Image (tube, helix red, strand yellow):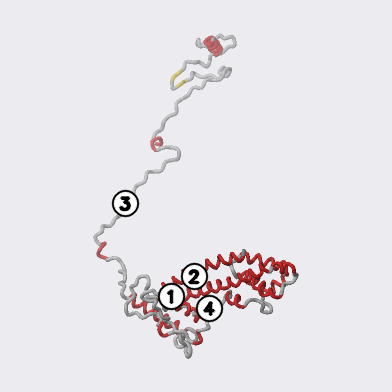
Amino acid sequence: MAVSRFQIASNKKSALMKQTMREIAKLLAEEPQPKEEKARIRAEALIREDNTVEAYEILMLECELVFERVKLIESMKECPEDLKSCISTLIWSADRVDIPELQNIRKQFRYKYGKKFEEACLNNVGGILNERVVAKLSVQPPSAYLVQTYLEKIADEFKVDWKPAVKLGAEDLSAPMVAPVGYSVQVAPGTGLAPAGVPPPFNAGDGLGDDDMGSGSGSGGGGGMTVATGAASRSTGASTLTDIPSAPAGPPSDKYENIPSVTATAIPMPPATAPGRSAASSSLDLEEPDIFIPAAPGQGGGSKASGASFGGKTTGLDSNSDDRDDGSNAGGGEASYDDLAARFSQLKK
């Protein structure tokens, strides 16, 4: 399974590398100025992928050897001497490649030979690891000479007329690629409205010598190049912004002289009224009507009044009349409560 996984991963990376090579060729063929710094970064990633594919091929061979000698490994308690380098390299590279099956191989060898054997493989005790695999899977960046060699080969393959703008010195051949300073970036790339006489922020044709880096009597390191780049950038910005007209400070004063002024007038508010009463009802004083409430049976004998009124009219009922239990009335000829009750019961029948 690990061998098949290695083969699939190698084919996938090879296809992506061909696409990256075409992109690098387009960057080198850019007009009016090639994007060399971006192409160098892409070339460094291409070298790393190329080294990974090379390491995959070696690890694939070691997996095939372990598979062929699996019977020997099962029969011996200790690791065979002729397989120590192969097994140690597989254990060391398990965390450095994207192959899940290699993690399972590492676990199987840890269960068989112990954790001390695994630690010795990870620390390369005795130099038993495959040096070529260790170099190809290293995290160290490639040298600047190797990056430039890849760019020249890609330019020749895709028929691109390109020459390196930065010349490498003898001390830069084995050192990693320097950080980009932006000499390949066009001035005002978004609009293309840069003046014709604006110099670039860095003269790429002069190379990156000691004088350009500010060594010697200067402040040391890359200070001279930084100051020169900043000054060029400031001069570029000044020459570009001088042609832009400034905005007016404010609106003309005579434009708004004939506009009439508006004065605010006070609106009288109605007087507040008490809550629960409207304005119409507050101005009227209506008298409440008199409501006649007859007395309860048996309570009208003790009270005396000249007469009861209903709605301002006399009812003609005399309170001086005595109601008797036998149903007879002494005065007035008015009917008693018992007579009314008897008549009401006859009407109900």
The answer to whether any part of residue 22 appears in the image is yes
Pointer 4 local density, CA inside 10 Å: few below 14, some 14–19, many at least 20: some
Q: Are marks 4 and 2 in contact (CB under 8 Å)?
A: no
Q: Position of residue 65 (x, y in %)?
A: 65, 70
Pointer 3 local density, CA inside 10 Å: few below 14, some 14–19, many at least 20: few
Front position among marks 1 and 4: 1
Q: Amino acid at mark 2?
A: Met
Which residue in the structure is indicated by mark 3?
265
Which residue in the structure is indicated by mark 4?
142
Which residue in the structure is indicated by mark 2?
17
Q: Is residue 333 above or below residue 211?
A: above
Q: Amino acid at mark 4?
A: Pro
Q: Quadrant of the C terminus?
A: top right
Q: Quadrant of residue 245?
A: bottom left
Q: Is residue 190 above or below residue 275?
A: below
Q: Report the residue that reaches farthest toward the right.
A: 77
